Image (spheres, grey):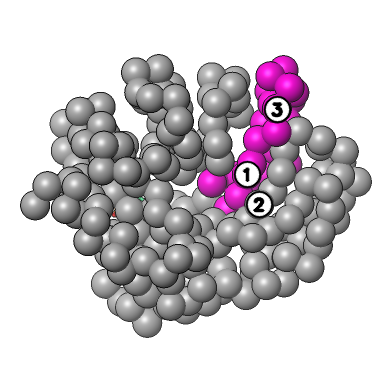
Amino acid sequence: MSIKNNLNQIQETLPDHVTLVAVSKTKPVSDLMEAYNAGQRIFGENKIQEMVDKHQEMPKDIKWHMIGHVQTNKVKYMAEFVDLIHGVDSFKLLKEINKQAKKYDRNINCLLQIKIASEDSKFGMTQKEALALLESEPFSELTNIKLTGVMGMATFTDNQEQIKQEFNTLKTAFDNLKAIQTNNCQLETISMGMSGDYLLAIDCGSTMVRVGSSIFGKRNYN
Ligand SMILES: *Cc1c(COP(=O)(O)O)cnc(C)c1O
């Protein structure tokens, strides 16, 4: 199957209110261009340097999403162009994003990463921590970021029931947090679901799915 066919097939299964992020990490620009020529405009990367390089080489109407864990000291490299940062999980990181966005006189959209997996390795905040953050004075002073939603990653398992429970946890957190509406916080997006579970995620309320291997094929990390 070609990248174009894969994309078309996936698009056909998505309801109108669901946005597809094509996760292109490790893939060459030629593959991304195939997706671009098939109409795809949102690409997700998990390494800042790789995203910066691809941004330089590719058409400028692409929206670049950072979906991986972000180190504070690297925010500056993507601040000029990144469209959405999915994995924001601390005030310290938000503060740095705000500072770098200011330099370019722009606003950077962010999703709060909520920890839903049972594994220790997944990043994210609890709903309680997120609530405390959104209600804090220092947060209200960040004028160059906007929190537009939440993001979560389910446990790496074949157990569909567990994955479903974890997706439901994220949906509940979203429903509770979205009551908070301020200048820099208007939650609309629930980023959850990958190649293996995006249909389940949509059933559980996802509005943004991050799909990689089902579009571009398996990744080779060597
Ligand atoms: C790699 C990655 C994806 C895509 O995974 P696939 O299983 O290839 O669809 C989605 N979200 C995040 C955060 C990723 O790192």
Kindly identify the amino acid type of the residue bearing the numbered disc 3.
Arg
Q: Quadrant of residue 14?
A: bottom left
Magenta segment range? 86-113
Q: Which mark is residue 110?
A: 1
The reply to whether the magenta stretch includes residue 96 is yes
Q: Which residue corresponds to mark 3?
A: 106
Quick check: is the Cβ at mark 1 less than 8 Å away from ligand 1? no
Q: Quadrant of residue 97?
A: top right
Q: How would you rate the neighbour count of disc 1 (Cα within 10 Å): few for under 14, some for 14-19, many for 20 or more?
A: many
Q: Earlier in the sequence, mark 2 or mark 3?
A: 3
Q: Earlier in the sequence, mark 1 or mark 2?
A: 1
Q: Position of residue 173 (x, y in %)?
A: 65, 69
- Left or right: 102 with respect to 211? right
Q: Position of residue 20 (x, y in %)?
A: 40, 54
Kindly identify the amino acid type of the residue bearing the numbered disc 2.
Thr
Kindly identify the amino acid type of the residue bearing the numbered disc 1.
Cys
- Left or right: 1 with respect to 81? left
Secondary structure found at label 3: loop
Q: How would you rate the neighbour count of disc 3 (Cα within 10 Å): few for under 14, some for 14-19, many for 20 or more?
A: some
- Is any atom of residue 117 visible in this view? no
Secondary structure found at label 2: strand
Quick check: is the Cβ at mark 2 less than 8 Å away from ligand 1? no
Question: Residue at left 68%, top 58%?
Answer: 187
Q: Which mark is residue 148?
A: 2
The reply to whether the magenta stretch includes residue 67 is no
Secondary structure found at label 1: strand
- Asked if the residues shown at circle 1 and circle 2 are in contact, with their CB atoms under 8 angstroms apart, the answer is yes
| Mark nearer the viewer, 3 or 1 | 3
